[in-house]
Structures are given as C-alpha cells and as structure tokens.
Amino acid sequence: MGLPSPEQLAELSGKIEEQGRLCHGVWGKFSSVMKSLMLKLGPMAAQTGVTKAVSAVGVTSGLQIASVGGVGLTLAPIGAALSPWIGAAMVATQAGKIFDLYDLRDDALKSAKSPVLYGCHCGKCAKNIQYIIDKKERNVALVAVGVGTLGVSAILKGFHSLGKKVYSAAKGETRPKEQVSRDLVDSARGGCTAAMGVVFLLSGSWSLTGPRDAETMATAVAIMTSSDGWEKLKSNW
C-alpha cells in the first residue's frame, strides 16, 4: 500500500505528543526504541529473526525516568504505546496514493485553504524537502558522470565531502544535511504530516499494491520518537 494517510499520521502525531509529555521530552536512543517496537510487534514483524534477536537482548517492561519526591516513575516503553498504531496502519484499507518527495513538497507549499493532503505548519518542510530532492539529484548526476570518467567524479566528491566535514567540525558548525534531518524530525514530532510522510518515505521501499513492512513502519516511528533518530534519517538519503 501507499504511505500512511494524512489522517493516520495525524492520529500518530497525537500519540507521539502524548509520549513526549510522559517522558518529559527525554527521548530514548533509536536502537532502544526500535528494539522495543519490534519486540512489541511480535508476530506482525516480517523479520522474525530481528524479533528473536530483540527478545534475546531483553527489553525491559518499563522505563525508569527522573524521580519525583524520591520515588522513581516507571513508564511503559514507547513500543508498548505506539506498536498498536503500526499494527492498525499496516492493515488499514485507507492508504491514499503512493507519494514521492515532489508530491510531499508540493503539499507542504499549499495553504490551509487549498486541498492540502500532507500539510505543514512549521513553515520549514517545503525548503527541507527541496534540499533532499536537490541532494539526491546531484548524487544521481555524479553517478552518471562517473560512468564516463571511470568513477573520478565520485572520488573527487568523496574528498570534497570529507573536507567539508573536517572544516565544519573545526568551526563547530552543523552541516546542512544534519540540520535538515534534525528539522524534519522536529517538524514531524510537532505534527507536520508532510515531514512525517518524508520520514516514512525514506525509511524503506513503498509500492501502491505491496504489503507494508513492519520493520519499515517501526523505523519511521522510531526515528520520530528517539533522541538520535535524525542520525538514522540522515543515513537514509
């Protein structure tokens, strides 16, 4: 099926907002959240080997957070709260059409008065999505050039990228790709369904008629509900 519908993402947004209140904005690490989600999905998970490996790790049934008055508060892990949504979204009949980055960008540019599907209210989504599109198209162009230059362009790109990383680290700057990834996760967590759609789109392969993959769905949700989820998103484009 296609991406989760805007209505489904709006429902997920509410659940994420609730989780944010429960954890006081202190989100877990991506790996831990992902393990929790996959464990709770259980038989619904397509990769049974992943589920077994998670079981072997032993994910706890509760999460200890800051104590109040000397009493530790134990909250249900994110997986327990959000995996039912994944299960429902996987079998829902309302899925909408398959979208790509161009469609999501165009939706993000629309005003509230127009027939918006995947919307944006942070004002950043369209620009961030366009950056990803430009980055992907530049990379494709470099691959095409590299075919005719025996890969020289790719080698030069690698040196150039490394140089920019070193320079940014020395200056203490946040590189554009990192900033865009952080912004998209923040926007998704804040309820922009356009940004949420991008996260889902970049978390795996989607088709109009194929089944939804539990691990892909869990990856997208874990990206939006973890402190370092932006790193996973950044690695996917």
Image: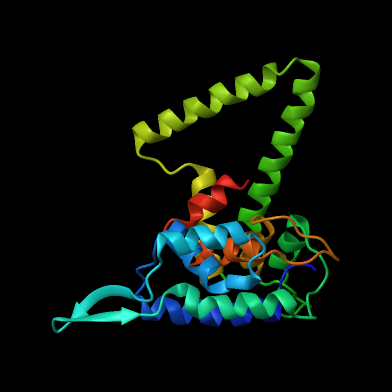
Q: Residue at x 63, y 72 (%)?
A: 43
Residue 5 makes an appearance in the image: no
User: Is residue 29 positioned above or below 1 on the image?
Assistant: above
Residue placed at 50% from the left, 54% from the top? 230
Q: Is residue 148 above or below residue 175?
A: above
- x 77%, y 23%: residue: 145
Q: Residue furthest right?
A: 209
- Which residue is most to the left? 70
Which is more toward the observer, 75 or 42?
A: 42
The quadrant where residue 148 appears:
top right
Between 3 and 101, the residue placed more toward the observer is 3
Can residue 105 be seen in this snapshot? yes
Residue 62 image position (x, y, % from top left): 35, 76
Q: Is residue 71 left or right of residue 161?
A: left
Which quadrant of the figure has residue 32? bottom left
Q: Quadrant of residue 31?
A: bottom left
**Quadrant where the N terminus lies?**
bottom right
Q: Position of residue 158 (x, y in %)?
A: 58, 25
**Residue 138 drawn at (x, y percent):** 71, 35
- Which of 92/234 is in front? 92
